[in-house]
Image (cartoon, rainbow, N blue to C red):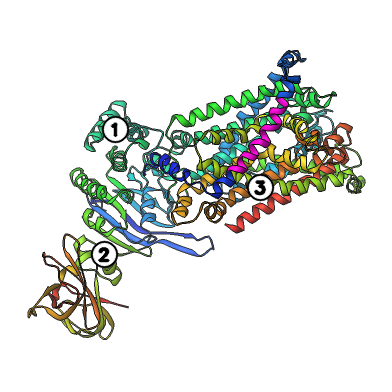
Amino acid sequence: MSVSDFQLRIDHLSKSYKRQDGTPVRAVDDISVEVSKGDFLVLLGPSGCGKTTLLRCVAGLERPTQGKIFLGDRLILDTASGVEIPPEKRRVGMVFQSYALWPHMTVEENITYPLRMRGASKDVQHSKVRRVLDMMRITDIAEQHPGQISGGQQQRVALARALACGDELILFDEPLSNVDAKVREHLRLELLRMQRELGFTALYVTHDQEEAMALATKIAVLGNGRIAQLGTPQDIYFRPLSLYVGRFIGSANQIDGHLTKQSDSAVIDTPLGRIRVPTRCIAAKGSHVTVLSRPEHWSLTSAPNQNDLCFEAKVRASAFVGSHNEYLVEVSGVELQIWTLGQQLLQAGSKMWCSIPTESLVVLDRG
Amino acid sequence: MPNLTSDRPRSWTAIRRRVDGFSIFTGLISITILCLVLYPLVRVVFDTFVPDGALDLDVFRDAAGQPQLGTVLLNTIGVVFGATLIAVIIGSTFAWLNERTDVGINWIARVLPVVPLLVPPIAGTIGWVLLAAPRSGFLNGVIRQALSSLGYEIFEGPLDIFSWAGLIFVYVLYLVPYVYLTVAASLQNIDPSLEEASRVSGSGVLATLLNITLPSVKPAIAAGTVLALITGFSLFSVPVIIGGQADIEVLAVRIVHLMTASYPPKTGVAMVLSSLIIAFVGLAWWLQARMVLRKNYATIGGRGIRATEVRLGRWRWLARSAMVAYLLMTSVLPLLGLILVSLQPFWSATVNPEMLSFENYQRIFNGGSTQIALRNSVLLGIVGATVGMLIASFITVFLTRNRGWWLSNLIDGTTKLPGAVSHLVIGIAFIGAFAGPPFYLHGTIAILFLVYIVLYIPQATFSAATALAQVGEQLSEASLVSGASQTQTFFRVTLPLMLPGLAAGWTMLFVLIAGDITASSMLAGTSNPVSGFVILDLWVNGSFPDLAALGTVISLMTSAVVLATLRLARTKR
């Protein structure tokens, strides 16, 4: 892959600042990441993990302490040589968390603004704004002020404004966190369609893992200013590389134990007995490990299942949530979450067999 | 952003229906102030226009027949509008520099709004007279010396404080902070991502400033302008000192003259002339209200992220120098002038170190009326500021909870009234209403206390309203929802969150009261002297060393209070 196939390259970027009491904080700690053209990279992590700071560094709104940033072939930041292109010259689109729609301008004026600022001719301004208004289906509210339209419409206007210039890279700072769940789901799908159709590259910050999975072609899970794992949504979900990632993404059952044998498969001693997992484990023999499993990979049956890992279990609580049933079961003093399909909901107190294919288990070092 | 505006009327009417003890209490306080402001004014209006129960409009003829009335009006408009315009430009620029750029003097952001309070206007004006009087001004002395070493010999000037430029200059010094405060508060409140979005959209620092920042803070600039106009029209200390010598008479001074130079005072004519000021200010308010109403200004803050700092580059030093120069001109320089003269046996542009002594201080602290006046001013300042801010907080909460009610509008207008009416008219109105029967407050500290509360209630309610606006409605609503009563919500949530804003207001009130001259010249006497009364007396007698010593003492005292409040506010944060 040649250099120019990257839309965005972040190279050893760090940003530290001092707290009010003087203790230094590394909000972004030596992060390097590359985003290919057309990729949708989601920066995912809990609040305070540095994801927003990283995004703002790319926009030029925050000044990194160290590192380089390339937009395509263009060097936009290099602390070593003092290169720092100001935000207005970086040519990126951005959607803010509060949308930041200027209240004193109409929707159309808001969207025209970036084009006007970059010196597009009146004709170009007009045709591009018409196109993006059309595309976002907001032509009918073009004359309104932002205070007069709904949250979902504001979100569309913000996106339209970011897209108006046709920039290659669009930055998103938790743009869906201010709308309610129904609208959020709808806007998420719309955003997805828009990105896949138009093919812009997206850098998207969120703390919502479901949103991240739905939108991303790649996810970077961040923790303490570093990238804990970078990969496709499937990688992150099915093959977490650390307990931090495994626990942050989705619901997870944890069975703690010791690694006793390690060849082509790992053998772990747990309170549930000896578990053999057919994957290589990075941990050393004898170390404390956790066997991680997803609730939906388990099944509950009335008779034991010989092919899979199987335990006798007691249902502690059960709930029907519409798309599936959720159970809390107990196996030898360990509680497991299990989600199953089916119209019959088992009652609490039922004695069942729970089983899981060993390929679905992930062994992680507890450190 | 969620559309909060449309929900507001519903939630407020819902709360209004819940009348409890606290609502009644704040309502009573508000109505008391309403009466305290309106009763004397109504009474003086009646005494003027309806003496002996019949309408008498002769006062208008008397007013129109005032000598040089046109000149006085033109002077007033020229000085106040000119000074306000300059102050708005300087104040807004300073606010933007401090809130949005890397000008990087953090202490200036805290000190600038209160720095003119360090040296009260009357002391500062006298300080500038001592610095820039054409013959004996210290600055002129220094400049003449420098010029003579270059071979130019002049015997007067080049600076002349007793001129249009000098008069406007000192006005501007004291109007800038009003604009600065309002604009800076608004800049802190607007969502910084509005400006960030503009930068990302490809517009540079200047284009963002013009297209986004300015329109967003336009209401605040308008509010600051009105505030500066009100203050400018009521300002008496600066024109009485400088305007008198410069032969530039303004309305405030003419009104004072009408009240004090003849016996009995020409209350009626003074009232008619004051109504001109009320008309000017009313027009300004109306224009401002129209401007804010016309557009839907959303001021929902972001996530408390400090806005990206604009890097000024080589302009940084220019900006810094301008701000430091302003600080020097409002506090350090006039204070230096005061201190120098206070140590001299007589005012002279050439300082002879052998003649300097503390004799003037010994004289003013010799148990005479000056000492009593100082003590009275300090006590009135402390008690008046505390009571005034508490009352203002109650009124503000009452007004916020009862928005749109006719009584609220009346109270709102009334609390602004004292700023529009010349302080002297209020003073005279108070004499008419409270000096004689049935109150018999003539020559007491109590009448001064009451008049100070009324005079400075506009500043007090303004600070309280700003403080309350910064708290935001949701925090108080959350407390109500959590089951707290209105009283509990006020004392546990609203008031503590308002405190930093209230502290600033308290300081302002203290300095205004301790350094008051307008009302003091009317209501104080030998039985209840205050510092403003004594200062005017000394100015008229031309005893500059005593005047300078008293000015120094007052300035050092108010500076100490202001700096202590600032320090307190800082450690509390």
Alpha carbons under labels 2 and 3: distance apart: 52 Å
Crowding at dot 1, Cα within 10 Å, few <14 / some 14-19 / many 20+, comes out as: some
Q: Can you give x and y, in whole percent of width and height, for residue B59 in the image?
A: 74, 16
Q: Position of residue B19 (x, y in %)?
A: 50, 46
Check if mark 1's residue and mark 2's residue have beta carbons within 8 Å: no
Magenta span contains residue A128: no
* Residue marked by disc 3: B506
User: Residue under circle 2?
Assistant: A249
Q: Nearer the viewer, residue B394 or A323?
A: B394
Q: Which residue is mark 1?
A: A141
Do discs 2 and 3 belong to a common subunit? Answer: no
- Foreground residue, B115 or B399? B399
Subunit of label 3? B
- Which span is picked out in magenta? B27-45
Quick check: can you spot residue A13?
yes
As helix, strand or loop, the secondary structure at mark 1 comes to: helix
